[in-house]
Image (spheres, grey):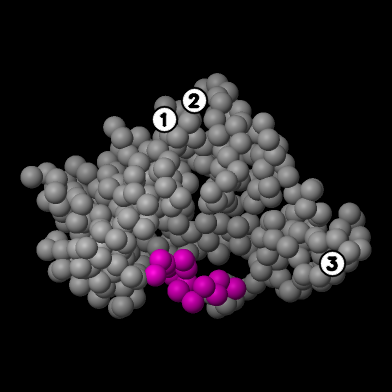
Amino acid sequence: MQKIVLGLSGGVDSAVSAALLKKEYEVHGLYLDIGQPEGRAEAKAAAQALGVPLTVMDIRAELEEKVCTPFAESYLRGETPNPCILCNPTVKFRALCAHADAIGAEKIATGHYVRTENGALYRAPSANDQSYMLCRLLRQQAERLVAPLGSMEKAQVRALAADLGLLSAQKPDSMEICFIPDKDYIGWLSRRCTTPGKGDVSFRGEVIARHEGFHRWTVGQRLPGLYQERKLYVQSILPEENVIRAALWEDLFETELRVRDMNWLIDTPCAPLRARVKVRHTKWEMPECTVYPAPDGTAQIECDEPVRAPAPGQAAAFYDGPRLIGGGILCRKNEN
């Protein structure tokens, strides 16, 4: 039976994935250890219950270098990074592929809600689609991926876990950043670096308020209170000036975007192409667009319909129909 390496966390998604994969593969679990004893114990318990061998790999150094440090630096640039999108290609999938190579396994697997077919990635039909989170996988990583939950709804996965008697069947979904389990990213940033101080909030060239540090805000977030009986939102963050620029809701929408560090899951295009773009992990807002790739790894995007508050530092994922074809990092307007 063909070997496969599964990222096994002890959560319901990876546990059910293991049970499904065992029908076709010799499953080898890999737990990526970031120094949390409870998570390690849950993964070991799940592996034992499923009859799956488990390897524990300490990834703390890689996580610090490839994810934590860039995450903090991005916030200090006035951006809004997504740590999972940073982690997937540089830490998680790199570790899965390395372990697969070490034991002679061709394929890797995760509990992501994404469809895989002939080495390509597709949006899952369920409400839990996670293809956006994988837009910066290296092509060679994506080509090895098996995702057994790709056509399932979360309720189906939980019901199957209960039928199998898995302890994780009722375990709540993890919504926090794995290296910030208390969800307090402001406190986390403050403990590791000097954070921005107080500064101005401006609206149409006029200073209207003060902020406690621009790292506490993201583009599109509503500002407190009202201004002339209207709600205001963060339109942009100017870190060099320590200024948050505010705008009305209708002024948050944009049709022209720019991305850097483009990653393609298809042959790198040398001409403009039509696609759909997704600028945040939501279930809506995927306008058609034209992508103009440049040789330096940037791309200009012209959307047919405006997108709301594209936040610098977030990923923009591109789709050809349901197929995920790549992703880049949204730039600030004045960024080259």
Residue behind mark 2:
269
Label number found at residue 266: 1
Question: What amino acid is found at the position of numbered circle 1 in the picture?
Answer: Ile
C-alpha distance separating marks 3 and 2: 46 Å
Q: Residue at x 54, y 30 (%)?
A: 275
Write down the region rendered in magenta. 172-186
Mark count: 3
Q: Position of residue 251 (x, y in %)?
A: 79, 48
Kindly state the secondary structure of the residue where label 2 is placed. Answer: loop
Query: Nearer the N terminus, badge 1 or badge 3?
Result: 3
Front residue of 213 and 167: 167
Alpha-carbon distance for marks 2 and 1? 8 Å
From the top left corner, tell me how far across and down residue 22 is, in percent: 15, 52
User: Which residue does the image show at 57% across and 23% down from the upper left?
Assistant: 272
Q: Amino acid at mark 3?
A: Leu
Please rate how many residues cluster around mark 2, counting C-alpha atoms within 10 Å: few if below 14, some from 14 to 19, many from 20.
Answer: few
Q: Are marks 2 and 1 in contact (CB under 8 Å)?
A: yes
Instruction: Look at the numbered discs 1 and 3 and tell me whether their residues touch, using CB distance below 8 Å.
Output: no
